[in-house]
Image: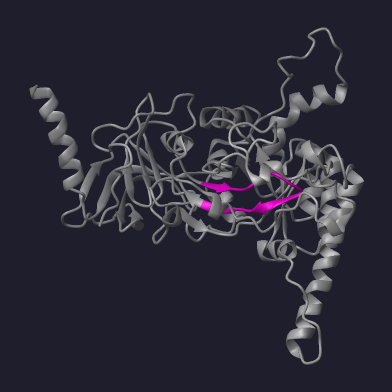
Amino acid sequence: MKQFLLFISLAMFSLAQTPVTVAIRNAKLVTISGPVIAKGTVVLRNGLIEEASENATVPDGAWVIEGDGLTVYPGLIDSISNIGIAPPAPTGPVTGAITATALAPPAPPARGPEDRPRTTSWERAADKFRSNDPRIESARNAGFTSAVIFPTTGIFAGQGAVVNLAGDNPSKMIIESPAGQYMTLTGGGGAGGARGFPSSGMGVYAYVRQIFIDLDYYERTKAAYQANPSGKQRPAYDRALEGVKESGRLLMPATSKVEMERVIKLASELKMPFVLYGVHEGYRAASVLKQANASVLISAKWPTRPPTADPEAEEPLRTLELRESAASTPVTLNKEGVKFAFYSDGQTPAEFLKGVRLAVTRGLSHDDAVKAMTLSAAEIHGVSNRLGSIEKGKIANLVVTKGDLLTEKPAIQYVFVDGMHYVPTADGAPTPTAPQGTGRRPR
């Protein structure tokens, strides 16, 4: 009974005694944007980094964390994710209540670009984001404090958002929106992706080009009408084109060198900023990416032999080479000066970090690996003035470890998101000092 009362007292104390300021003192600071500070202090106030240096002064009344033996990193960023976004509704047989929608006849297959097949460019991840996704806590427990989330269904799937991974109000967790248009470049226009236009890779490329031809005409028509509307028929509103326009840039997939060359050529025709994602064969295409001044997001889900594959079946040499060499892409691109970051590609946080560690064993330096999950990710997504490094004025997203963050089982002591304090445990359950959902922002 006494132990139970002590537990309750500690929990209530942690809630009632939220510090005005947090100071992590005498810790190793891996700033990313500058040199490592062997013994420094970082001060957090109102969700921001107030100071981070060797000689930072601990303000009166601050909650002090003694940092001897601890290392402070910027919070990790997953550069492409669907965390917090519910999966699309199933399209199988109708069950349960019958609605008017269920009784409606299926839409006819797309006949051409005028039908806008597989385009939901107007959809915003920020509108779909939910804070009660259990994956958020799992990611945070592993040191991820931000993610760039996207709808992922369709040729033009929708607009992304940069989100912080803590809080109970989705609108307060959004850092930036939109964060680009996610594209898939895969054919199949009908139900299940099997019918209608476009049904081939060539058709997809033609469709994408047509969208941008339509966008150019749409913009010129609107401008002419707005300049002199008298006597003119007003142009119709096209949400698909508006969604593409307001996205700002395109995230376009490419795995092989040939695909990278094709997508880079397509993007140059579209005259819109772009980022490539996937890029497992980047070890063969570093010079191509460098010449195009391309930024890339590398999937840390390296190719492996499918578990259901016939063990006796022969595989093409190119497949075996990709499987062996894909994890050397990061170090190859780094040597060429191509900016890159990592993303999880649907993996768990542990699997994601395991993939990054494999890239380190293939030659990528430890520091560059951490940078690819922090500052480089923030730079590619245009939020490096707020995230990605330990600098004065940036959002207080930090990971505090005992030892190296990239070990197989990193000893994460504290996670700060927007200055809110969380203490992960081995089983993912919060400790009494930071009960579930009650991490506190210093006030």
Does the magenta portion include 31? no
Where residue 441 appears, x then y in whole percent?
A: 30, 52
On-image quarter of the N terminus = top left
Tell which of 378 and 313 is nearer to you: 313
From the viewer's perspective, is 310 left or right of 171?
A: right
Residue extending farthest to the top is: 312
Residue 320 lies in what quarter of the image? top right
Picture residue at 34% right of the left edge, 56% below the top: 47
Is residue 327 depicted above or below 121 in this figure? above
Picture residue at 8% right of the left edge, 23% below the top: 2
Where residue 222 appears, x then y in whole percent?
A: 76, 79
Picture residue at 54% right of the left edge, 30% below the top: 348
Tell which of 410 and 304 is nearer to you: 304
Where residue 20 appears, x then y in whole percent?
A: 21, 55
Is residue 3 depicted above or below 179 in this figure? above
Q: Which residues are magenta?
A: 147-162
On-image quarter of the C terminus = bottom left
Residue extending farthest to the left is: 2
Q: How is the image coloured?
A: one colour
Q: Is residue 152 visible?
A: no
Tell which of 129 and 229 is nearer to you: 229
From the viewer's perspective, is 207 left or right of 45?
A: right
Residue 126 lies in what quarter of the image? bottom right
Is residue 164 depicted above or below 383 in this figure? above
